Image: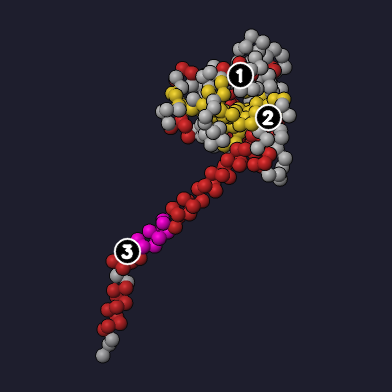
Amino acid sequence: MPDTTISRTSRNRDGIANNLIVAVGVSLFCSVLVSAAAVILKPEQQRNEELYRQRIVLDVAGIYEAGGDIEAQFSAIDTRLVELQTGTYVSGIDPQSFDALEARNDPDVSIRVPPELDIAGIRRRSIYSPVYLVRDGDTLTQIVLPVYGSGLWSRMHGFLSLEPDGNTIRGLQFYEHGETPGLGDQIDKPDWRAQWSGKLLTDETGQLRIEVVRGKVIAGEGDEHQVDGLAGATLTGRGVTHLLQYWMGPHGFGPYLQKIAEGNANNG
Ligand SMILES: Cc1cc2nc3c(=O)[nH]c(=O)nc-3n(C[C@H](O)[C@H](O)[C@H](O)COP(=O)(O)O)c2cc1C
């Protein structure tokens, strides 16, 4: 006589309900595992992102020592918070922990960029921005400013380093963007980046003239404000022009740069 107990049990185990329970259970277990990993690893991830940004600040200022302790090197830089509208330093807020990008979501510390001024396509910006002052002893040697704006496909984030005159560029380096490899991502090429050194933001009348041209820079009047275009990626290059024009202009760091040029921003 066949053992009906065993065949009934195995039929139950293979039933649709059982399979569903196992599938849902495994999915739930896996999703809890993935979520827990994301939550646990988030602080570490944020710390690594911050370290990476600090490295780029050091790099664009030309003072990064490869292989060294980034935090130790960065601690030599004086991080300050500037109120963009007035160009004055802000006290009472920790500049190290203030996140100007996150602040865009907080109506208390951000403003809408009027569409007619929004050439960088950023829509809102924090009313404060960090600036990074590099000193040699008591002497200000460089000012590093965060900049961002739309490229063709993505928001491009970088740092611009200026001489203490607030007008001569030392370097421009992006640390985050989603432009196309081989096209827009030529903004990361050392040869292209090297061209920024020594270029001037404004002319002698104070007009903001910095730009990425289409094609090659032609030697002559105005070439001290120009950098070669990116082959096959004119639109990313235009995005770089626009973000620099916005951030160095009157709605961005303009008032602060004015103070720098007048020699009033080193102290404070
Ligand atoms: C798949 C694809 C990706 C592209 N990526 C970029 C890019 O990242 N940046 C850019 O400026 N142009 C990019 N382009 C090209 C633009 O559509 C446009 O043709 C180009 O910017 C014009 O520059 P040019 O006048 O120097 O050719 C891409 C085109 C294609 C088809």
Determine the image quadrant of residue 76: top right
Q: Amino acid at mark 2?
A: Val
Q: Amino acid at mark 1?
A: Leu
In the picture, the disc for residue 257 is 1
- Tag 1 secondary structure: helix
Determine the image quadrant of residue 245: top right
Q: Which is nearer the eye, 52 or 157?
A: 52
What scheme was used to colour the molecule? secondary structure
Measured Cα–Cα span from mark 3 to mark 1: 65 Å
Please determine whether, in this image, residue 59 is positioned above or below residue 10: above
Name the residue tied to disc 2. Answer: 134
**At which x and y percent is residue 170?**
69, 26
Q: Which is nearer the eye, 172 or 132?
A: 132
Name the residue tied to disc 3. Answer: 20
Residue at figure coordinates x 35%, y 65% from the top left:
22
Please determine whether, in this image, residue 224 is positioned above or below residue 145: above
Residue at figure coordinates x 54%, y 47% from the top left:
45
Please determine whether, in this image, residue 10 is positioned above or below residue 252: below
**At which x and y percent is residue 192?**
68, 30
Please indicate whether residue 204 sits to the left or right of residue 4 in the image. Answer: right
